[in-house]
Amino acid sequence: MLNRAIEEGEMQKTVLVIDDEKAILRSLKRILHHAGYKVMTAESGSEALQLLEENRHIRVVITDYRMPNMTGGELLANIKQRFSDVIGIMLTGYADIESVIAALNSGAVYKYLTKPWNDTTLLAEVESAFLHCQELDKLRSNSGSLGIKNLLSRHDVMDLLGQWMSGGIQTTAVYLDVNMFRSYNDSLGYEVADQILIALAETLVKNLPESALLGQMGGDEFVMLMPEVCSETETQNLIETLLLPFHKLQNIAGRELYVSFSAGYAFSPDDGDTPEALVRNAQAALFSYKRSGSKPFTRYRSVMNAGSRELLSLRSDLYQALEKNQFTVVYQPKVSLSSGLIVGAESLLRWQHDSLGMISPATFIPLAESSGLIEPIGDWVLATACSQRRVWQLEGLPSFLLSVNLSGRQLHQKSLAEKVKHILELAGIQPTDLELEITETFLIQDIDSSVELLNELKALGIKLSIDDFGTGYSSLSYLNRLPIDTLKIDGSFVKELPQCRDRVDLVRNVIQMSHDLGMTVVAEGVETQAQLDTLNTLKCDEIQGYFYSPPVSAEQFRVLLENQPLVGKPYQP
Ligand code: C2E
Ligand code: CA
Ligand code: CA
């Protein structure tokens, strides 16, 4: 029993209105008709779907939320699936706001209006929906540089933002960046890397919210544009939904790849009132995001520009350091006390800044942590050190355990174990060749999650080391719960050996208990013969420190590998 009011004539600008209350249908029809639209009406979701099936020219629907059998949210989700060209506007009472937000986040709803509505606002939204249709049609007939329909070029992005902004439309720009994309270029070559980009862009486009468009800003950077602004939580949820397909391994170009994104966003006009400013600030937010809870996507804030100018410029330089190839990894040997042979090497990051020279990791690691950059940087260190390890292996040099530092922030990444596995595979080294150093301070923050996380990492077959032992909680009581292979005694303890008796006793106890738990003990920061002798008496297993070698370049480390056992000498500062 269809209740229709089909207007004949021009096929464009037809609005379908759905409400189970006849009075509301009549009122909406009158307003829209008066404004020059063709109007069709339906009293239920199923009736609306049938009308859409029969009238493919309908592009905009306005639906009530609360209806028997099928809610407005369910209807619009249905419409999004079956009629992807149709744009949905929802009318709702305040009581249903929660459900409407869920529907908004699912991407099926273009806009929502609360009842009782304001006629002018309603008409403005309907007009904006039709404008959006036109843009979609225009854009769908063009192709972006990756040859994907709907994917805009940088130029298109700026144009479109310009149009929206001059039309007074509030706009959201979400800047997306593929973490560690360079490693694909490096390890798989540009052709495969391009195939990966195409697959990623296609997945993103398929998964875009209703009103959104995607542009490629160059290489592995994308921007998602929406002609609307919602709350920060809603925006974060939208981003999370957009990136959901990437939580699992991707099958691309015959490979299983783990791909992750970083994202930052900005709203116009508040966060930028020109297309350039909006995009630039969304990008700034991408790099400066501070993780709130587990959500690594943050809105641009002007405070990102506050704070010490020096740190700020250092931080902004940090964004580019990877691109500009300013990072290197140096290696410091861990030497067996009994044999003098190199049994391991710690990878340590170095930043060669254009104008400031070498910057210590003690300065920039915290900066990288607070800005979220530690994730791509940490990925780079891991990938670089692992490929270097592979090179040495292929050269037939003696084998050793490679260590890489992992910051607390990196441990928060989703699917860290997957990522490590992936990097090992790309580099072509065995899991048993890798050890991750994690600081004690981080591990004790949440023992239960640490146990879970470490077990996941252990399951890959890699080794785990507890770093800087003695600087934090310094208790061995929790250690038997963690699957740790190695304990590193912090340099500050070693410094006071052998003159401080208390320290000697403490280090003796730590070594004994670690051995009881089956762990290997490494002493850091060993500089003098006396320290070495004491550690030898205390049955420490390995020594790392200037006594044998400072951290050195890959080339210099090769020389060390070729000239074992090492002959140490006391370090003179
Ligand atoms: P760490 O993990 O405790 O690394 C050991 C630090 O002690 C290194 O400082 C090393 O150069 C220094 N060291 C080694 N032997 C001696 C010695 O005999 N005497 C003295 N005085 N120092 C010695 P570095 O390279 O400046 O790194 C500082 C910290 O920065 C590291 O402490 C680590 O926490 C962090 N870091 C370095 N590279 C990375 C990285 O790739 N990722 C992460 N997340 N953190 C890193
Ligand atoms: Ca370390
Ligand atoms: Ca350490």
Image (cartoon, rainbow, N blue to C red):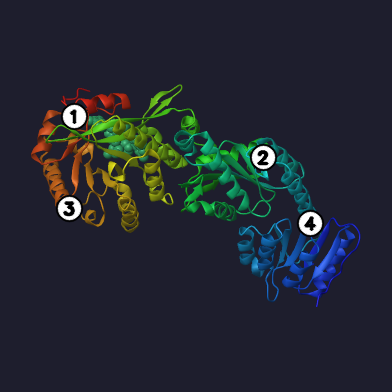
Residue 552 to residue 229: above or below: above
Q: According to the image, label 3 marks what residue? A: 517
- Residue at the disc numbered 4: 126
> Ligand 1 is located in which of the four quadrants?
top left
In primary-sequence order, the first of circles 3 and 1 is 3
Spatial CA span between label 3 and label 4: 69 Å
Q: Secondary structure at mark 3?
A: loop
Circle 3: is it few (<14), some (14-19), or many (20+) Cα within 10 Å? Answer: some
Which residue, given by chain and number where applicable, does mark 2 sit on?
144
| Cα–Cα span, label 3 and label 1 | 27 Å
Q: Which residue is mark 1?
A: 527
Q: Residue at x 13, y 34 (%)?
A: 339
Sequence-wise, the earlier of marks 3 and 2 is 2
Q: Position of residue 124 (x, y in %)?
A: 79, 54
Q: Which kind of residue does numbered mark 3 sit on? A: Leu
Marks 3 and 4: which is nearer the front? 3
Q: Earlier in the sequence, mark 4 or mark 1?
A: 4
- At a point 77% along the width and 73% down the height, the residue shown is 43
- 179 left or right, relative to 201: left
Secondary element at tag 1: loop
Is the C-beta of the residue carrying label 1 under 8 Å from the nearest atom of ligand 1? yes
Quarter location, residue 146: top right
How far apart, in angstroms, are the residues tagged by discs 4 and 1? 74 Å
> Could you tell me which residue is drawn at 27 percent across and 46 percent down?
463
Residue 458, numbered circle: none
Pick the residue in front: 33 or 364. Answer: 33
Question: Marks 3 and 2, how far apart in space?
Answer: 58 Å
